[in-house]
Image (cartoon, helix red, strand yellow):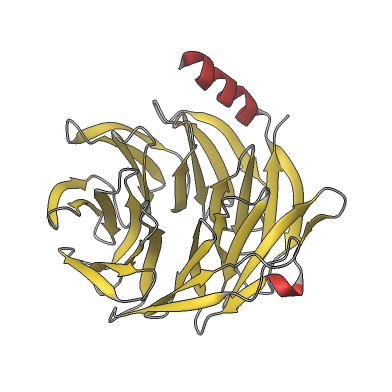
Amino acid sequence: EERSARSEYEWASQVGLEASEVAGDRPVTGLACLGGRDGAVVTGGWDGNVKLWERDAEAGLKVKPSRTLGEEEERVTCVRAMNGLVLACGTGVAGSVYRCRAGDGDDFAPAERVELRGHKMRLGRAAFHPQGEYALTTSHDRTMRMWSLSTGQEVLLQDGHFSAAHGLAVHKEGSLVCSTDFGGVSLIWDLRTGKKIQHFQGHSGRVLACDFAPDGFSLATGGDDGSVKIWDLRTKSMRSTAPAHRRLISTLEYSASGESILTASYDGTMRVLSARDSSKIRVLEGHDGRVCAGAWGEREIWSVGGDGTLKLWRGN
């Protein structure tokens, strides 16, 4: 583990900007890596478009017209991807699932769309359940809901927040879900029983982002106060806290190894932090204004921002 951590930290310490492309004429706020396609990401923005991008060795970043998956009625603020499915949500009351069917050659055929409708107010975040049959969403109506991917029907409603629900993460085993809210609270739900089993509070202001560690024993959260807090699910206590950013943290995500955490912030930077003690490994600067989302690739980092750009970051 020590050797693995050192190797990842060394790589992260050398990461720099490799490519940048205008992804929209308005802020681009949703970002996800599309599993199964090397170098492919999906973006969503205030223009309502959900787009698929692929890295090109010669031309840098490009998007083909046929790779616009769909157009939402409202701003897109969150996208997720898994097994050829793309999940999008934003300022509207409904989310969308796009099924990207492989066509001839490398191109996708026109995407099939399933609507997730039932929330009473705008959505916060969305996530796939690891079994691949369900999606989950949070909303400012203070609820978290689970949906069938095949039918778009609601199969579970959890209420328990006293303010707008926003952040969302699903445990790798699929039994636990974390939802966060604008009151500074993070709740852990057991989907097997439908009950709230843990309650974490420690941030000053809204909690906007959360993620479970790959080992399943820890949870990281971030929000308005710019700090990253790591919670131990076994002892039900805070393990560490660090002032990572000067402004709010928009997204955070564990690396696949669990050794690092990538954060994006409205202070215009992303940071790679040690998941052990939240210490800083690398600061990534390049966006003109707020960074709305960051995501890990295989051996790369992607980001989108209020400047309308999609950026690719790589190490040696």
Vertical side of 231 occupied by 160: above or below: below
Taking 80 as reference, is 235 left or right?
A: left
The spot of residue 34 in percent (x, y) is 58, 55
**In the image, farthest residue toward the right:** 58
Of 99 and 238, the residue lying toward us: 99
Where in the figure is residue 96, as x and y percent of width and height?
A: 45, 74
Seen from this angle, which residue lies furthest bottom? 73
In this rendering, is residue 153 above or below 268? Answer: below
Q: Residue at x 51, y 63 (%)?
A: 85
Picture quadrant of residue 155? bottom left
Q: Is residue 287 above or below residue 214?
A: below
Screen quadrant of the C terminus: top right
Q: Is residue 28 visible?
A: no
Residue 68 falls left or right of residue 160: right
Query: Which residue lies at the image location 29% right of the left edge and 78% below the top edge?
Result: 119
Question: Is the N terminus in the top left, top right, bottom left or bottom right quadrant?
Answer: top left
Residue 105 in percent (x, y) is at 76, 62
The one nearer the camera, 75 or 182, is 75
- Tell me residue 16's x, y (percent): 71, 38
Count the marks.
Answer: 0
Confirm whether residue 96 shows in the render.
yes
Q: In the rendered view, does 214 fall on the left or right side of 120?
A: right
| Residue at x-position 74% and y-position 60% | 106
